[in-house]
Amino acid sequence: MHESSTASSPPWPRRVIAAVLNPAHARRTTGPVLDPARWGRGHTRLIILGLLVATAAGVVEAVRHASDQVGGSETVRAVLAAALGMGLIGLALTLRGTTVPGFLVGLLYVTAGMLSWTYTGATTWALLGVEGLLFAIWTFPWVRDLVGLPRLGTAWLGLAYWFLGVIGAGLVLRPGLAMERVAYAGLFTLGALAIVTATRRSGQDLSIGVASAFLVALAALFLVGSGNALDNVHTVPANAWGRHMEHRFWGGPGLLYHPNSIAVAAVIVAIRIGADGTFERWQRYAALGMVTVILLLVNSRTGLLYLAAAAVVHALLIWYGRRGSASPDEYGRRSFPTARAAWGAALLPIVLAVLIAVGSGGTGFLGAQRYNDGTDDVTSGRRATWVQVWKDFTTDNTAQKIFGDTSNARATVHRPSSGGAPPVGGLTTDNAAVGALRRGGILGVIAFLFGLGLMLWHAIRGVRLPGRGRYRPSAWFTMAAVGSVPTIVSADWLLGGTGGTLWIYLLAGEAYLLHSAARQRRRDAGATVSGRPVAVSPSLAPD
């Protein structure tokens, strides 16, 4: 029997290739690498490996500071930081529902973001080329799922302005620029198609795999940056972006990531795990502990804003659930049978957000002027960039006003710097609404508002089913989508792009919601045709 089974099983290289190249392979998921509910040999091996890695990190720091009086404390900090990194890997390995397609999408997007902050454009473009090729293989022949993209609000948010920009470049007779934007538009459209196709073919929620990949990326930053992660002074990029930012954790030599990007990845993981009752309780608390530590280290106001907004939405969901209103099942009376349990669950994330704000410096942190350029600008230069965008818009020709700026492929901003310093260029708008205007013009703003409204409609109301009420979204998707709205004022996260972690995560959630609703429609139609009574799905609620 054993020999027959072995002979019929394909060799492991073939299985790996099938898992990577065929999204439908995720349909045969076998559970997490490590059982989150039962200790096994794998857990012991991971602990041993973690101790070895942490010890190695400590030895490296001990050697580096052998002649310093602070060598002992640096060694301890490195050991703790490396242990934290290995702990994040362990958490990722215990997540039920992680799929290869979801993990690969998340890993490719977050790695592209890290590489863009660490290396030159050639390295990032090499990874983007691999990403595009893989997604093209997944989604071939492309047409079937392409026609469904307009049903996703997130697709409008992250794709519309690229196509508008292509038209704008053509109208001002800049064919080279138009072709560059065609490349960008094609790449990110393939990313969206990869999510939709993999969700349809596997029937799985890819967002768990995306969150798992983000955990691994965060772990890599802590492992590479173990020598400075818990220090007061951190390794930063050797350019204007890193100037005066030594108090924020970026990673380590050879692998850096902007603190705000680290923050959003941590908040994404905390929402996905912490708000999902199917995970073990220790996993949910671990996710909350993880985001608390990371936000304290990266000193990100936008990340804290996202966490606080999601925490408020979380509390509102519990309140509506306790009232018996339409809300996700995991937030009803079955999950919080007593008022005390409901209050505790509602207040814990809010309390953590307050503690993070206080621990980061309180009012001094919230009102800090980051770049010390002689102004009182608490927006870290964003306001000057927004003013420049408006000035450029008022002087643009009609085509640019309608379809967006055509100064460069990504429509980045060049503006005078403060304090008589040289002009600065290549700036993003750090405001999704302003970014939509810059990249897509008036039509870009309209597309942005439409996409935002459609995504929020799905996140709050779900998807309508014929004669049956609505297919309700999961609580984590509601929190992630609604909580992202306040970040519009200080981040381009909702617009996607290279390293668009929040965008691809929300896209995965929205795609799975629509896929699940369509699957429920087919089930209901089949039950009606066969004459059997139609069972009410637990994810349904009456209008």
Image (tube, grey):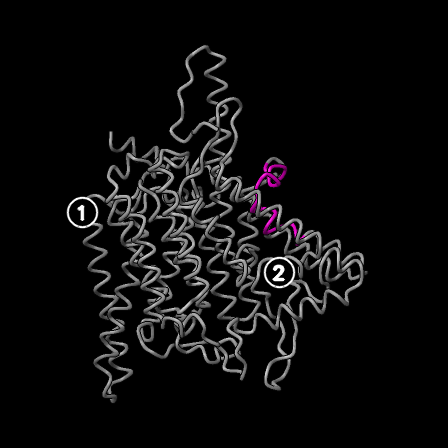
In this rendering, the answer to whether 142 lies above or below 263 is: above
Whether residue 240 is visible here, answered yes or no, is yes
Q: Is residue 11 rendered to the left or right of residue 342? A: right
Furthest toward the top, the residue is 531
Observer-nearest of 126 and 218: 218
| Residue of label 2 | 435
Q: Amino acid at mark 1?
A: Trp
User: Where does the magenta region start and end?
Assistant: 145-162
- Residue 165: numbered disc: none
Which residue is drawn at the image coordinates 46% and 22% (left, top)?
523
Position of residue 450 measured from the top left corner of the image (x, y, whole percent): 62, 46
Residue 291 point in image, percent of width and height: 34, 59
Q: Residues within 10 Å of mark 1 (few under 14, many from 20)?
A: few
Count of numbered labels shown in the rendering = 2
> Is residue 3 shown in magenta?
no
The answer to which image quadrant residue 202 occupies is: top left
Q: Position of residue 527 (x, y in %)?
A: 45, 16
Residue 40 % position (x, y): 18, 47
Name the chief secondary structure element in magenta: helix
Tag 2: amino acid: Gly
Which comes before the other along the chain, label 1 or label 2? Answer: 1
Q: Are marks 1 and 2 in contact (CB under 8 Å)?
A: no
Quarter of the N terminus within the rendering: top left
Residue under label 1: 39
State which quadrant residue 477 falls in: top left
Crowd rating for badge 2 (residues with CA inside 10 Å; few <14, some 14–19, many 20+): many
Determine whether 531 is above or below 467 in the image: above
Q: Residue at (51%, 46%) from the top-left corner?
A: 507
What residue is shown at x 51% (from left), y 59% (from top)?
Answer: 499
